[in-house]
Each structure stands twice: as structure tokens, then as C-alpha cells.
Image (spheres, helix red, strand yellow):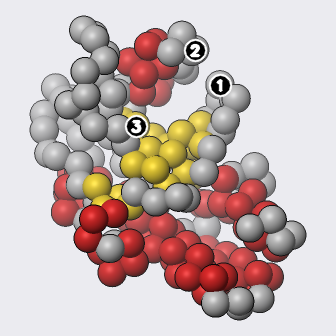
Amino acid sequence: MIEAYGLTNVVYFPRFSTGESVESRASALLSSVGLPHSDAFISKENPEDAYGSGFDPLILGSRFDHYGLSCPEESRSWWLLGYLFTSLIALDPLSGKVYAFPESEEEYILLHRDIESLQFSLVEFRKIEADHENDVDPEELAERFRRVVGAFDPTPFADEESQWNLALEELEHGLW
């Protein structure tokens, strides 16, 4: 992650007890590998920022309540990881699966089988961003991303409305 995004653009999640069991691999990867903070992926807000009593910036249900949004009951205890483009990204700490809440939607979609897949995809995405800046053909970049990431985990492309599919469409159509 550091090689792709640089030392100052990686956010590490502290290990802490939430009172529930947590998928240990997800917790370990978030605290040791971290997630980037970039134009494409904006990491979680600082949990030490003051939002008032009862607000927990890490817990999805608390965030939705704070902003007066409806949160599906089964996802209330999920952890907010950040935003991938315009989708809110959350982790189900019990299963380790990563979900996306597309902008203006109340439903969510499975985006990654686990944290490792999200991290892998974000590193690969940084590579295509760099190659795009060096004028590599956008269609070639999109195909490479689909091939490499899909071989590791096909989940990011399973839903045609996933944020990864939408971003690659924009790349292919020259909207970057």
C-alpha cells in the first residue's frame, strides 16, 4: 500500500474491541496494511473528531442516524471504511466482506469478498491511474484491471452497477 500511495497517504485502523466478534484477518489487515487516502478512495474520518454524544464515526448505523438516513438493519454494526468515488464503503466485521452503498441509494451491494481483495484492487487501481497519466490506452488499462483483479476476486465486477464497473466505463469513454 505504501509503495503505491506513499507513506503519508495510508490510513491505518486501530485495533480495538467493539464488543462483538470481529473477523480477525480483516482487523489485522486494516491495522497493518491500511487503506489509502487518495482522490479515488477517501479513507474514514478521524474517529477522534467531535460529533456529539452517541455518534460513532466508525459504525455505519450511527452515521446514517446522524444524517437522518435509513440504514438497513443488518448493516447497522458494519464499519465505515471510506468512500470509493461516490460509494460509501463498509465492512461487515463478522464476515469480513466489503460492501458498497452507491450514492443516493439505500441498498448496498457486495463489492469484495474480503479486505485483502479491496486492498489489492486499490493498489491495482493506483497502477492504472499512473499508467493513464503516462498516456497508456484507456481501454487497455480497463481490460488489464478487470483481468488482474478478476483473477484475484471476481466479486468487484459481479454487479454491473458496482463502483469498479462504473469507473472503468468512465475510463474507457475518456471521462478521466
Res. 151 visible in picture: no
Give the alpha-carbon distance from disc 3 to disc 1, as whole Å: 15 Å
154 on left or right of 7: right
Q: Nearer the viewer, residue 97 or 10?
A: 10
Instruction: Name the image quarter holding residue 174.
Output: bottom right
Indicate the amino acid at tag 2: Ser
Helix, strand or loop status at disc 1: loop
| Label located before the other in sequence (3 or 1) | 3
Question: Which residue is labeled 3 in the image?
Answer: 80
Helix, strand or loop status at disc 2: loop
Give the alpha-carbon distance from disc 3 to disc 2, as whole Å: 15 Å
What is the quadrant of the N terminus in the image? bottom left
Q: Is residue 160 above or below residue 6?
A: above
Q: Is residue 171 above or below residue 114?
A: below
Indicate the amino acid at tag 1: Glu
Mark linked to residue 70: 2
